[in-house]
Amino acid sequence: MKRNLVLVVTLLAFMAFSGDIYAQKSKKKSAKTQKTEQKSNIKKKKSKSSGVEKDIVTKIVNNMVLVKGGSFQMGATAEQGKDIYEDERPKHSVKLSDFHIGKFELTQAEWQAVMGDNPSYFKGNNLPVENVSWNDVQRFIKKLNQMSGKKFRLPTEAEWEYAARGGAKTKNYKYCGANSYNSIAWHKDNAAKKTHAVGQKKGNELGLCDMSGNVYEWCADSYGSYSSKSQTNPKMVRSDNFKVTRGGSFLSMNKFLRTSFRSKETATTANPNLGFRLVMER
């Protein structure tokens, strides 16, 4: 009987030991399963994110408009009338090569897909992104170029004005697409003190929308005085911190919506009436 009791105790101990081993194996298997599921979820999120990024890049590229190069008179041309400011003088000849420019101002959805945040004061996927500094835009462009394998940048001031005037198709309008501004611009008298979805107003001769009004647009150039000399593909680079902005905004009166009107901000300035559009090199 004593021997039977020893056998029973031994058997119970073995069963307990086997149970511990099974529990440990089960625990390890469960942890491994959880890790596998986590990795799978991360891959799915990355795949989904990558898909959104690819769609946004495709959209940005598809919205690029070819601007055929040519020569034009930049600055204080006759149709600008009595609204001309001194920094628009002297009128001068500029020759530009072909380039592609965005049909629309960059939207909040596009910024969000690249940067993962939305700094804008007014919120809406199809509203122009705003409240971004020149320096912020450079960071966005760097990341977009890495993501897309293409070369995006801000337009030079000369490219911006040439495109705003309608390029080689120009009809010499005072504003970006017309001699009256209500049909082509969101401004202080019709915008209700807020931005509006891009592309709601009539485009100019090249089909570019909102180059007058909605938000001011950053240019690549430093701000500086014009020269009377003829120039080819000019870009102003200075050591100071002021960058060119163009086009006027939803807070602007009509004389600030003109094709030749110039303004400036420091590269660190960000506010709700300041956004941008892109140029793409091919």
Image (cartoon, helix red, strand yellow):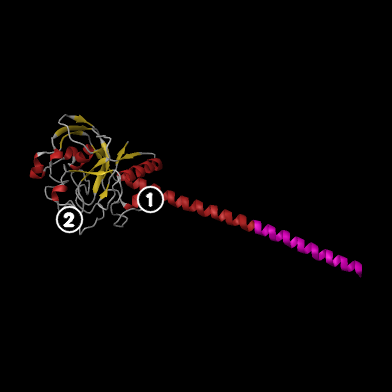
- Classify mark 1: residues with Cα within 10 Å, few (<14), some (14-19) or many (20+): some
Q: Which residue is mark 1?
A: 113
- Type of residue at label 2? Lys
Q: For the image shown, how many numbered marks are present on the structure?
A: 2
Left-right relation of 173 to 148: left
Q: Horizontal and vertical percent for residue 2?
A: 91, 69
| Quadrant showing the C terminus | top left
- Type of residue at label 1? Ala
Q: Which residue is mark 2?
A: 188
Q: Earlier in the sequence, mark 2 or mark 1?
A: 1
Q: Foreground: 206 or 181?
A: 181
Residue at position x 84%, y 67% in the image: 8
Q: Horizontal and vertical percent for residue 6?
A: 87, 66
- Classify mark 2: residues with Cα within 10 Å, few (<14), some (14-19) or many (20+): some
- Magenta highlight range: 1-28
In the current view of this chain or complex, which residue is farthest to the bottom? 1
